[in-house]
C-alpha cells in the first residue's frame, strides 16, 4: 500500500513540475515586447504567408481579410501590435545589408495565447515580398532587422 501512495505522490509531483515548466515557458513569450525606439527598434524578421491557405492560419486581425502576394504586409508581436492601434499603419524595416522597405501592419503575431507555438515578443512577421525587397533569403527563417513607424 505504501508503494502505491508513494507512486501516486511521485506521479502528481512530476505532472505539477511539467505544468509549471510549461507555464513558465509560455510566460517568457508574453505581451511585453521590448520598448519601441522611435529611431528604430531591433526585431526578428520571420516569414508568413498572409494569403488564403497560408501559414497565417486565417484572415488578418486588422481587417478580417487575406493579404496574398505581392502585398507588403506584416504582423507584429502582441506588445507592438498594441491592441490593434498600429493596424493599417506603415512601418519601415531595415536589414543589416542596408536595404529597407515599408510594409502595412495587418495582423498580430500572438506572443501570449498560442503557447507553446506563440511568437516571440520581438517579431515582425512579414510577407515574402518584404523579404525580397530587403534582399534576404527566406530559407534563413529568422533575420535580425530594425523597424520604425514610417
Image (cartoon, helix red, strand yellow):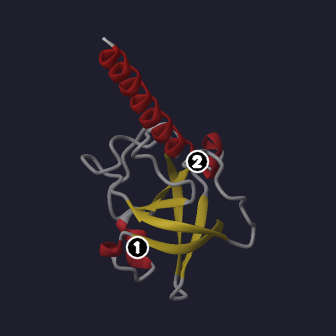
Q: Does residue 85 appear left or right of residue 143 in this picture?
A: right
Q: Does residue 42 appear left or right of residue 53 in this picture?
A: right
Most foreground residue, 144 or 107:
144
Is label 1 in contact with label 2 (beta carbons under 8 Å)? no
Does the image show residue 36?
yes
From this view, report whether residue 147 is shown above or below residue 89.
Answer: below
Which secondary structure, mark 1? helix
Q: Residue at x 36, y 52 (%)?
A: 50
From this view, report whether residue 72 is shown above or below residue 56.
Answer: below
Position in image of residue 10 (x %, y %):
39, 27
Which secondary structure, mark 2? loop
Looking at the image, which residue sits at the far bottom? 97
Query: What residue does disc 2 label?
Result: 87
Position in image of residue 121 (x %, y %):
56, 54
Q: How would you rate the neighbour count of disc 2 (Cα within 10 Å): few for under 14, some for 14-19, many for 20 or more?
A: many
Residue 81's tag is: none
Looking at the image, which residue sits at the far right? 38
Q: Residue at x 67, y 58 (%)?
A: 34
Location of residue 27 (image quadrant)? top right
Residue 131's tag is: 1
From this view, report whether residue 54 is shown above or below residue 125.
Answer: above
Amino acid at each position: 500500500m505504501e508503494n502505491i501512495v508513494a507512486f501516486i505522490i511521485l506521479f502528481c509531483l512530476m505532472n505539477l513540475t511539467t505544468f509549471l515548466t510549461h507555464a513558465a515557458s509560455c510566460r517568457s513569450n508574453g505581451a511585453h515586447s521590448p520598448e519601441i525606439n522611435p529611431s528604430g527598434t531591433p526585431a526578428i524578421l520571420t516569414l508568413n504567408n498572409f494569403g488564403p491557405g497560408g501559414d497565417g492560419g486565417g484572415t488578418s486581425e486588422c481587417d478580417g481579410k487575406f493579404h496574398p502576394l505581392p502585398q507588403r504586409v506584416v504582423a507584429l508581436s502582441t506588445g507592438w501590435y498594441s491592441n490593434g492601434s498600429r493596424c493599417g499603419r506603415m512601418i519601415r524595416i531595415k536589414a543589416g545589408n542596408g536595404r529597407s522597405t515599408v510594409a502595412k501592419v495587418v495582423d498580430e503575431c500572438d506572443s501570449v495565447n498560442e503557447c507553446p507555438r506563440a511568437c516571440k515578443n520581438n517579431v515582425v512577421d512579414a510577407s515574402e515580398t518584404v523579404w525580397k525587397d530587403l534582399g534576404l533569403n527566406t530559407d534563413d527563417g529568422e533575420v535580425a532587422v530594425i523597424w520604425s513607424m514610417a
